[in-house]
Image (spheres, rainbow, N blue to C red):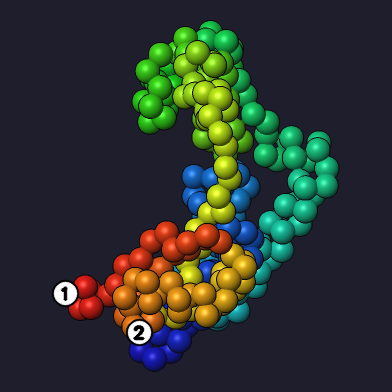
Amino acid sequence: MLAIVVRTVILYLLVVFSLRFMGKKQIGQLEPSELAVAIMISELASIPMESKDIPLVNGIVPVLILVCCEVLISWLILKNVKVRKYISGKPSILVEHGVLQQSALKDLRFTTDDLLEEMRMNGITNISDIQYAIMETNGQVSFVLKKSASTPTVEDLSLPIQDDQMPFPIVVKGEIYKDNLKRINRTEDWLNGELKKLHITNKKDILLLCANDKKVMFTQLKEKKQK
């Protein structure tokens, strides 16, 4: 029993670090080659996990080989446009200037119902409002709306623009993220001063505190302290 637990933990860590090494992507953002490798890794890792008679190395070596192959392919895709085209494919235009591109839909075996579903998921109701609908290499559809259907920006409305730095988590579960504090060009003395304004005496009481270079944007205490 102990041997099975140890083998399972080792293979689990191997799969996690292998996928982490290949890069951060969600399942819906994986290229075809990356999805194939992810599936194969999970299958290979499960073989020695199921039986003690199969040597652990029979699962580890193939997984490492697959990871090396994927890293090599990723490097080739990065360096060579032709390799990128053959392995990852290229984006296809499904709608252009409000007109369905029937040949592209047919080649991709992408029905009009599929397109309408993607439109609804993106809050688009009228094909005529679409400047371009593009099928990306990861299978997701990107939409570029016509100016007449786009949400007006601050610049379009000729309003004064002032860029603010985005808020960063500064205190999480009572722990100060010093790197983020440096990123907003503030010190712990500044943070202590802000906490005094919020009547917080102990940083350990904080569940989450976010701030930018100007002020604290969000604060929430742990449940017991809120009560």
Q: What residue is shown with label 1?
A: 227
Residue at the image position 57 percent from the left and 37 percent from the top = 161
- Decide: few, some or many residues near mark 2? Use Cα within 10 Å; few <14, some 14-19, many ≥20: few
Residue at the image position 57 percent from the left and 42 percent from the top = 162
List x then y, in percent, for residue 166.
53, 54
List x then y, in percent, for residue 111.
44, 19
Instruction: From this view, report whether residue 206 is shown above or below residue 75.
Output: below
Mark 1–mark 2 Cα distance, whole angstroms, equals 15 Å
- Secondary element type, mark 1: loop
Q: Quadrant of the N terminus?
A: bottom left
The residue closer to the viewer here, 191 or 167, is 191
Q: Amino acid at mark 2?
A: Asn
Q: Quadrant of residue 80?
A: top right
- Secondary element type, mark 2: loop
The residue closer to the viewer here, 190 or 33, is 190
Left or right, residue 169 beside residue 197: right
Q: Amino acid at mark 1?
A: Lys
Instruction: From this view, report whether residue 89 is shown above or below residue 56.
Output: above
In primary-sequence order, the first of circles 1 and 2 is: 2
Q: Quadrant of the C terminus?
A: bottom left
Residue at the farthest left position: 227
Q: What residue is shown with label 2?
A: 202
